Image (spheres, rainbow, N blue to C red):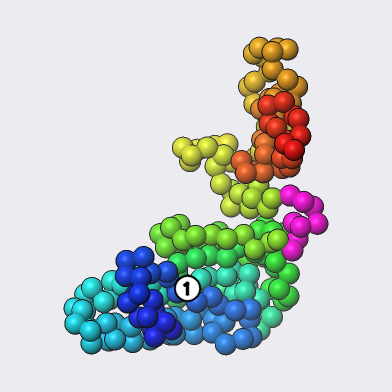
Amino acid sequence: ISDLAVDSFKKFKNTSPIISIENPPAGMGFSTGEELKEIIEKSREKFIEKLKSTGMNEKKAREEAEKLIGVTWDVGHINMMRKYGYNSKNIVEETEKVAPLVKHVHLSDNFGFEHTELPMGMGNVPIKEIMEKLGKEGYDAKKIIEAGNWWQHFQRSPLKETLESFGSPVYSSGQAPYWNQSLGFQQNYYSGYGAFLPQKNYEIFGGGFSGLPSEFGGQLRQDNNRLSGNPLE
């Protein structure tokens, strides 16, 4: 890991891609927080020594190590440790061990036995407690929803259900309402220019949040023009 990070840094300098090591499904090597913490910390130290040998001071080398080498924490994979006797408390404790090292978070749910990759909220991953332990690193980390195997059969985006499971606010102000309260929401838009605007406009922007296009968190597949409803091709 350290060799790859050093080669990358020498070639790309400040634009070097990060190396983020993921915890694999339970039972494989480095599948616990303790094991992952050890390999990342040792890799960072080796990276620092190699950069120091090129003339870089230790402070700068350590900054680069912390920026370029870290952890991808897969909450579904660590939850599979339940089949080896772990409980929610143990899973959160493993999360705490790697919290300062986290760069990415992979989101999927399961019941602690198989790698089912369910949407968040459909299993028993203690996601609220995990995110609390990850703290600022978890908030800043890139989060990837890994529930494609489930949602491919419904031809829908998993974004809305994921936001619901997190209790995320609908608006950026951070206040109510929340996505897990969105069922039955209606927008205050039932008037305007009447026949001057086509029916398609009201179907999208005059209905509930679930009627929005998928890129806005809704469930509407977009194969035509949003204003007129005419095919794009």
Return the residue at label 1.
20
Magenta part of the chain: 149-156
Q: Name the element at disc 1.
A: strand
Chief secondary structure of the magenta span?
loop
**Amino acid at pointer 1:** Ser
Quadrant of the snapshot with the C terminus: top right
* Res 208 visible: no
- Quadrant housing residue 58: bottom left
Pick the front one: 156 or 54: 54
* Res 229 visible: yes
The residue positioned 20% from the left and 79% from the top of the image is 56
- Quadrant housing residue 45: bottom left
The residue positioned 42% from the left and 82% from the top of the image is 4
The residue positioned 52% from the left and 37% from the top of the image is 171
> How many numbered discs, if any?
1
Residue 152 screen position, x and y as percent: 76, 57
Quadrant of the snapshot with the N terminus: bottom left
Residue 219 painted magenta: no
Residue 127 screen position, x and y as percent: 58, 62
Residue 154 painted magenta: yes
Taking the image as shown, residue 57 lies to the left or right of residue 45, namely left
Residue 48 screen position, x and y as percent: 29, 82
The residue positioned 62% from the left and 44% from the top of the image is 215
